[in-house]
Amino acid sequence: MRQRHIILLTDGDTNRAAVEEYRSLTADDSPPTSIGVTTIRIGDNTVNLKLLQDISSRTGGEFHYVENARRCPT
């Protein structure tokens, strides 16, 4: 079986007006998807941590918070 997965690297900032627009993509009543989303939040502030955690958990992905990109494994 083929599995699809998205890895989203982000600073957490959004240029969209409402966070709710993103939540609607993974809402319980949205069409089921077989695409998992792992979110990796990079930076030392806490902008949209809950949103990124929600996206990952609702799609079967993982959430990672990296405060300092220089500490990422190479």
Image: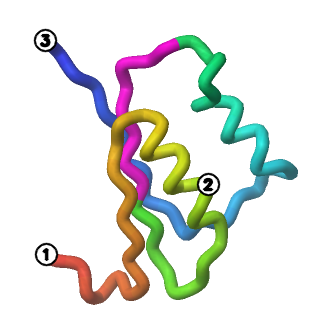
Tell me the kind of residue under disc 2.
Leu
**Which of the two discs, 3 and 1, labels the residue nearer the N terminus?**
3
Q: Which residues are magenta?
A: 32-39
State the image coordinates of residue 29 (x, y, percent, origin top left).
Answer: 65, 17
In magenta segment, residue 46: no
- Residue 63 position in % (x across, y down): 39, 57
Q: Report the front residue among 68 and 24.
A: 24
Q: Which residue is labeled 2 in the image?
A: 51
Q: Quadrant of residue 12?
A: bottom right
Graded by Cα atoms within 10 Å as few (under 14), some (14 to 19) or many (20 or more), the crowding at tag 2 reads: some
Tell us which disc is closer to us: 3 or 1. Answer: 3
> Residue 15 vs residue 54: left or right?
right
Residue at point 35% right, 82% down?
Answer: 69
x and y percent of residue 30 in the render? 62, 18
Q: Is residue 70 left or right of residue 15?
A: left
Mark sitting earlier along the chain (3/2): 3
The answer for how far apart the CA atoms under marks 2 and 1 are is 27 Å
Q: Whole-Å distance between the Cαs marked 3 and 1?
A: 30 Å
For disc 1, the marked residue is 74
Residue at the image point whose x is 44% and y is 46% from the top:
56
